[in-house]
Image: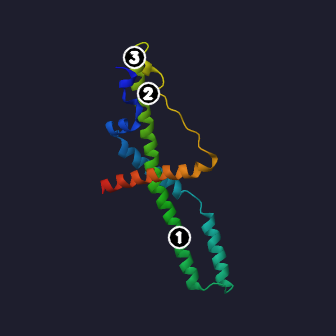
Amino acid sequence: MTLRDAPHSSSRAYAEAAPAPPAAAAAEATYADLVAGLLDAREDLATARFDVALTAAVTAGEVSAETARMLRFWQRSAVREVVAHAQTVLAPTLAALDRSRLEAADRLARDEDVFATAEPGDPGTLGEASTTVSEQPAGQDDSRRQVIVAALTRSTLLDLRAHH
C-alpha cells in the first residue's frame, strides 16, 4: 500500500468507518453527571443579590409584591435554562473530544503503518498526509466559531432525534 492509497485525506472517512467506542454512552453519562455536579456546586451570588435588591424595592414601594414574584420567577427560569443548556451541550462535547482523541490515535497508527510499508521514492510519502491550517483574518474569528458551533449543534440535534 502506498500513501496515496491510504484513506488519510479525509477524517470523515474514518468517522464513518469507525464505530463509536462501546463505552461511549457510559462516558457521556459520566460527563453528564460531572457537568451537573459542577453546575450544582456553583454559588449563585447574583441571585442572592437580586433577591436583596428586589426585597428592598418592594419595601420602599418601588415594586409591587406581585411584580417582584413575577420577576423572581422569570429570573429563576432564566438561570434554569442556562443550566439546562450547559448540561445538554457540555457532556456530548466532552464525549466528542474523547472520541476525537481516539480517532486521531487510530489515524496516526494507520498512517505509521502506511509510512512503514511505503515504497522508497513514493511521491505520496510527503505532502498528502500533511495538512495546513489557513490563517483567518482577525475579524473572522467570531464567524468561524459560529460556523463550528452551528455544525456541532446540528450534529448533536440529529443524534438526539435519532435516539428518541
Q: Residue at x 61, y 45 (%)?
A: 137
Other-residue count near label 1 (Cα within 10 Å), few / some / many at <14 / 14–19 / ≥20: few
Residue located farthest toward the front when viewing the structure as drawn = 123
Q: Is residue 33 visible?
A: no
Q: Which residue is mark 3?
A: 118
- Quadrant for the N terminus in the image: top left
Q: Position of residue 32 (x, y in %)?
A: 44, 51
Q: Which residue is mark 1?
A: 76
Q: Residue at x 58, y 80 (%)?
A: 68
Other-residue count near label 3 (Cα within 10 Å), few / some / many at <14 / 14–19 / ≥20: some
Relative to 163, is 152 on the left or the right? Answer: right
Q: Position of residue 35 (x, y in %)?
A: 49, 52
How many angstroms separate mark 1 from mark 2 (CA)? 48 Å
Q: Residue at x 38, y 55 (%)?
A: 157
Q: Position of residue 131 (x, y in %)?
A: 50, 32
Relative to 22, is 101 on the left or the right? Answer: right
Q: Is residue 14 above or below residue 30?
A: above
How many angstroms separate mark 1 from mark 3 (CA)? 62 Å
- Quadrant for the C terminus in the image: bottom left
Query: In the structure shown, which secondary structural element does the residue marked by tag 1 occupy?
Result: helix
Q: Which of the labelled discs sits on residue 62, or is there none?
A: none
Residue located farthest toward the right when viewing the structure as drawn = 60
- The amino acid pointed to by label 3 is Ala
User: Camera-side residue: 30 or 155?
Assistant: 155
Residue 117, picture quadrant: top left
Q: Is residue 157 above or below residue 10?
A: below
- The amino acid pointed to by label 1 is Arg
Tell me which numbered mark, 1 or 3, is placed earlier along the sequence.
1
Query: In the structure shown, which secondary structural element does the residue marked by tag 2 occupy?
Result: helix
User: Camera-side residue: 136 or 61?
Assistant: 136
Q: Which of the labelled discs sits on residue 108, or is there none?
A: 2
- The amino acid pointed to by label 2 is Leu
